[in-house]
Image (cartoon, grey):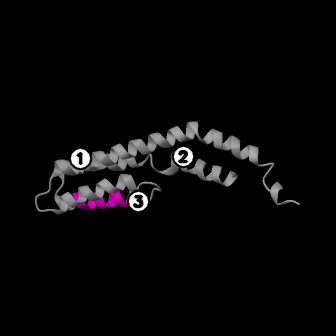
Amino acid sequence: MAGIYSLLNEKFQDDSGIGQLRSVLEGLLPELETSNSKDVTEALKQAKSLIGEVPGSYGIKSPLSKARRWFQKADADRQKAREFVDESLSVLASEIAWRQDAKQNMLPSIREYAEALKPTVGLRSQP
């Protein structure tokens, strides 16, 4: 049980990398407004790569794929691509919120439960 606590504790840490994704996504917004399609496509590709390195970030990365597709067309729709980046920011905010909530409300209970089980682990296997 202590292993589960350690795993969850690691998942909910602020340094998991998910908090830094906001600056990556917000950095795309000026690119969407001013850069040419090729540059925006490359920026979206790099952002997806960075985001993909963070565990549990698929929901944040997925809308960026859709935004990138809009810029691969001859008639790139900057507004539509912006909506997908905004969607990624929204998913990011909800990911951060549930992790913070779980860290504050759930993790202490799991820690307490793991500590209560420590003295009993292994007793069942004894004759």
Q: Number of callouts in the render?
A: 3
**Mark 2 vs mark 1, CA separation in Å:** 28 Å
From the top left corner, tell me how far across and down residue 103 is, in percent.
56, 41
Question: Residue at label 2?
Answer: 12
- The kind of residue tagged 2 is Phe
State left or right for residue 33 relative to residue 121.
Answer: left
Query: Looking at the image, which residue is at 58% across and 40% down?
Result: 106
Q: Is residue 103 magenta?
A: no
In the rendered image, which quarter is residue 37 located in?
bottom left
Q: Secondary structure at mark 2?
A: loop
Q: Nearer the viewer, residue 72 or 116?
A: 116
* Numbered range of the magenta stretch: 39-49
Residue at (45, 43) in percent of width and height = 96
Distance of label 3 from label 1 (alpha carbons): 20 Å
Q: Which residue is mark 1?
A: 83
Mark number displayed over residue 52:
3
Across and down, in percent, residue 79 comes to 17, 47
Which callout, 2 or 1, points at the residue further toward the start of the chain?
A: 2
Residue 111, by quadrant, is: top right
| Horizontal side, residue 63 vs residue 33: left or right | right
The furthest residue to the left? 75
Q: Dot 3: what SS?
A: helix
Q: Amino acid at mark 1?
A: Glu
In the depicted structure, whether residue 62 falls above or below residue 116? below
| Dominant SS in magenta | helix
Mark toward the start of the polypeptide (3 vs 1): 3
Marks 3 and 1: CB-CB under 8 Å?
A: no
What residue is shown at x 37% (from left), y 52% (from top)? Answer: 60
Disc 3 residue type (three-letter): Gly
Q: For the residues marked 3 and 2, what is the alpha-carbon distance in whole angstroms?
A: 18 Å
